[in-house]
Image (cartoon, rainbow, N blue to C red):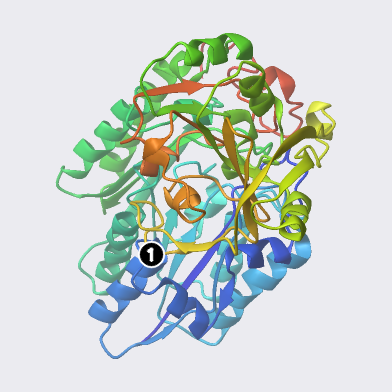
Amino acid sequence: MRVVVAMFKHETNTFSPIVTDLARFEAWGCQFGEAARAAYQGTAMPFGAYLELAEAEAAGAEIVTPVAAEAMPSGPVTEAAYERLAGAILDAVKEGCDAALLDLHGAMVAEHTPDGEGTLLERIRAIAPDLPIGVTLDLHCNLTEKMVANCTALIGYKTYPHVDMYEVGKQIGQVTFDAMAGKCTPVMAWGNVPLLSQTLRQGTDDEPMRGLIDMCIEAERQPGVLAATVFGGFALADMPDAGSSAIIVTDGDAGLAESVRDGLLDEAWRKRDDFLYEHAPLEDTVAAAAGLEDGPVILLDHADNCGSGATQDVMTVIAEVLRQGLEDVAVAAVWDPEAVREMQQAGVGRTVTLSLGGKTDMPSIGEPGRPLEITGRVKTLTDGEWIVRGPMYTGVKVAMGPSAVLDTGKMQIVVVSNHHEPWDLGVFTSVGIQPESKRYLLLKSRIHYRAGFAGLARHTLTLDGVGVTTSDNRLLDYSQVRRPIYPLDRINER
């Protein structure tokens, strides 16, 4: 037996000015062949679960790992990068295989296809029409007909932050191997609702998403239900299928799959208003934070979250926090390779004045880059490499690139050369900051911060700054998404 295990993941923010080329994937640690296997063996990723399962279920099989590629969310994937990485998977399938287990995202938009995952799966099916294919997708997947029509069984994460990636990978991988052994006959029913759910309202510890996830868990307890998934979708991908969806995998029972699917979609639509975020003036929220006596207080600069495709160099929120005089603040992180180089040249302990951040224009929202002149002491210089020890991406090596800490006296700012969302304490501890001792932790994140930081927070406030991960739909010019869709259109019936 020959089993192909591969990863090709990108969450595409079509409003982001950050180019997603091959170098973008390489910055995350794109690996080919045996290097891919070595990088993810034993990690809590779907890729790691697939490897473990294949070794157990197909003893003696040849396990082929053509590529493990992921890039931090950003703009559309270039055609060259897509074809290089997808091509590695296609070439492995062409050589012949008995199964393919794929660790994908579900919201990839490339220059030449709005449905990166669907196009990949369609091409695999053209090569091997009867190949058993198991697929894991992110909770923020924009599910399409091509994805469903060209695989054997499909599942998505049930957590946001995504701390169950290993478990869902093992679940759908097992379904795939069981189908190969004649132990089950996977049947899938899927559908969507015209709802652009906002990512900031999709945390699975909170309503409205919590209730939908509970419905999926309850459905999987029913005899014959192999997997049940509800996708919040990714509204920042302006493509025809963006929105909330659901998919059910049953053992040969199409009627059961359709019934469970319809219940999930009806409930998602009923809760549509709960998936919209309400904004508040930035200065008011910072003032409220200043009045809190106990910490750590988590301050979320969610509109500039690189984990959803932001530039990570917008200084609006940082400037307001400084203006209002908050003290004992740690920031993770500002993307500014140029500023890191200046601090390297100055050296640890030296005082520098930097034009920090604001290096990137954001034409999709009509915002130019606005650097912030700031003076501080170079506290730390590192290579930016560390291993995730928390519950999300456990065991994966992080490469923030050359990194530095600028200490202004009241604020310590982590400055990085590669985009990285702060979902693990390592973003601070790797540069010598103990986050539990700070009064304020200003994080450029939405929900993923909870994986590492939720246990520290005495209070959490969302700060409505500026950036291409805004939760204000009115600021975004949608042209490709299907219409009508809520809340762009005030519709009552789906």
The quadrant of the image that shows the N terminus is bottom left
Q: Position of residue 93 (x, y in %)?
A: 53, 79
x%, y% of residue 389? Answer: 36, 58
- In this orientation, does residue 66 appear? yes
Secondary structure beneath dot 1 equals loop
Query: Which residue is denoted by mark 1 in the rendering?
Result: 395
**Horizontal side, residue 438 vs residue 127: left or right:** left
Give the quarter of the image for residue 464.
top right
Q: Please report the residue visible at 56 percent of the width from the left and 15 percent of the height from the top.
A: 286
Viewer-proximal residue among 301 and 295: 295
56 displayed left or right of 392: left
- In the rendering, at what x and y percent does residue 252 appear? 26, 54
Q: Position of residue 222 (x, y in %)?
A: 16, 42
- Residue 242 location, quadrant: top right
Q: Give the vertical position of 197 relative to 172 (above or below).
A: above
The residue that appears at 66% across and 37% down in the rendered structure is 240
* Viewer-nearest residue: 473 or 470: 470
Left or right for 276, reference 228: right
Q: Is residue 42 above or below residue 484?
A: below
Query: Of residues 397 and 143, which is closer to you in this image?
Result: 397
Q: Is residue 238 above or below residue 434?
A: above
397 lies above or below 351: below
Residue at 34 percent across and 48 percent down: it is: 163
Residue 230 visible (yes or no)? no
Seen from the viewer's position, the closer of residues 116 and 16 is: 16
